[in-house]
Amino acid sequence: MIYLDHAATTPVDPQVLAAMQPYFSELYGNALSVHRYGQKADYAVEQARQTLAGLLNCKPSEIIFTSGGTESDNLALRGAAWAARQQGRGHHLITSPVEHSAVGRTVAQLVESMGFTATCLPVDAAGRVNPADFDRACVPGTTVASVMLASNEIGTLQPVAELAAIARQRGVLLHTDAVQAPGQLDLDVQRLGVDLLSLSAHKFYGPKGIGLLYVREGTPLLPVQTGGSHEAGRRAGTHSTPLIVGMARALALATAAQAQRISHYTARRDQLIAGLLARVPGLQLTGHPVDRLPGHASFTLPDVEANQLLMHLDLRGLAASSASACKTGSPEPSEVLLALGYAVAAARGGLRLTVGKDTTAADIDRAIDIVAEAVAALRRLGARSRLPV
Ligand code: PLP
């Protein structure tokens, strides 16, 4: 079986697993307990926070541990939007049509049920927002904007540093969902200039169920999950020490190997794109041809139904995705591809292949064969079903 769905999730690195192991058993204390069990857990949590802060170039106090990317996105948007409204600064939000649903549906709920207003920025055919459009969308009363660093579905990178500079001038907080970025893109929050940034460990060879939200010092944020005084009152709930330790180790490994991973990913991705475009008639690359995640290849096949293709690929030994993992299996056309201007048929024919650190050139050759065979087989079946009876 060849796994080309690393944008959906990655396996836990053995070094990460080894780092986490003791915190499931002998070091099981609650990090808020006063006794030595608690002290050891607290030490591990704070060491992990320091490691992560060093890797993101921020202060440890600017990191909030969450249960993953979805919660980080929810906390960023609701927390910052609620706090801004409470302070009487306004209730207008800005986002883009290519965001993950953790952002898109949170903004939709804020608008539909909580009295906020929002502007959804236009995107070009590659899925990019234009900084000039962003500037125009910042009006009096705009408080929070959210534009992702890199798309999980089409791989396209957004000009986040440029948007952050405009946001700062306009007094708007900028959140970026950077969930797809670790090991592939620069995550220095000072260079990016963002106020809020979401990460999720399972996308970079860490465990599932843990993420973080970077919150620039001084950014007003109301907690979304209330309870104990964890995370300086910003996110209640007992710390998962093993998962926090695992996330810090995983990000340290991803950052240390980043240059090597980028060249490895880029080589495999370009081999995949060139091979598939040469072998599969009618296949189109989606997203930006150059400014895209090094490990991300995405396509559309207007005459093929994505879910059928994915089943055929799985039976032949290739694990792939149509749009995002959250949407795979849905018969609805991809909203992201529709926003890029694709017709409904093309938006139903998305194919996403994302390479990982252990993907070999031989895996890619085999994957190209499998996709070419599966598409040809589906087209034969389609032609047969269209024969007059
Ligand atoms: N944001 C993006 C861009 C993602 O790709 C994902 C994962 O699918 C998420 C958010 C959600 O992250 P999690 O699975 O940790 O909730």
Image: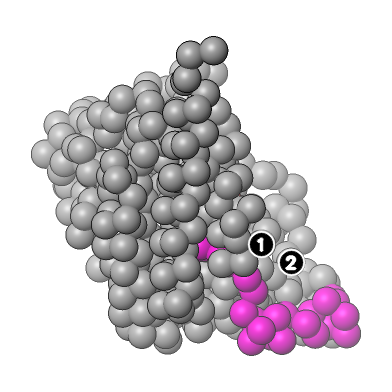
- Comes first in the chain, label 1 or label 2: 1
Residue 193 is a magenta residue: no
Mark 1 surroundings within 10 Å by alpha-carbon count, few (fewer than 14), some (14 through 19), many (20 or more): many
> Which residue is at 56% across, 67% downward?
2
Q: Nearer the viewer, residue 21 or 35?
A: 21
> Would you say residue 350 is visible in this rendering?
yes
Above or below, 345 relative to 174: above
Disc 1 target residue: 208
Dot 2: element: loop
Q: Residue at x 17, y 53 (%)?
A: 162
Q: Residue at x 58, y 47 (%)?
A: 312
The residue that disc 2 covers is: 240
Colouring: one colour
- What amino acid type should be assigned to the residue bearing mark 2? Ser
**What distance separates the C-alpha of mark 1 from that of mark 2?**
11 Å
Relative to 37, does residue 82 appear above or below in the rendering? above
Q: Which residues are magenta?
A: 3-29
Looking at the image, residue 41 lies above or below residue 30: below
**Residue 4, magenta (yes or no):** yes
Residue lying farthest to the front in this orientation: 389
* Mark 1 residue CB less than 8 A from any atom of ligand 1: yes
Q: Nearer the viewer, residue 146 or 99?
A: 99
Q: Judge from the rendering whether residue 329 lies leftward or rightward of residue 162; answer left or right.
A: right
143 on left or right of 15: left
Q: Which amino acid type is shown beneath numbered disc 1?
A: Lys
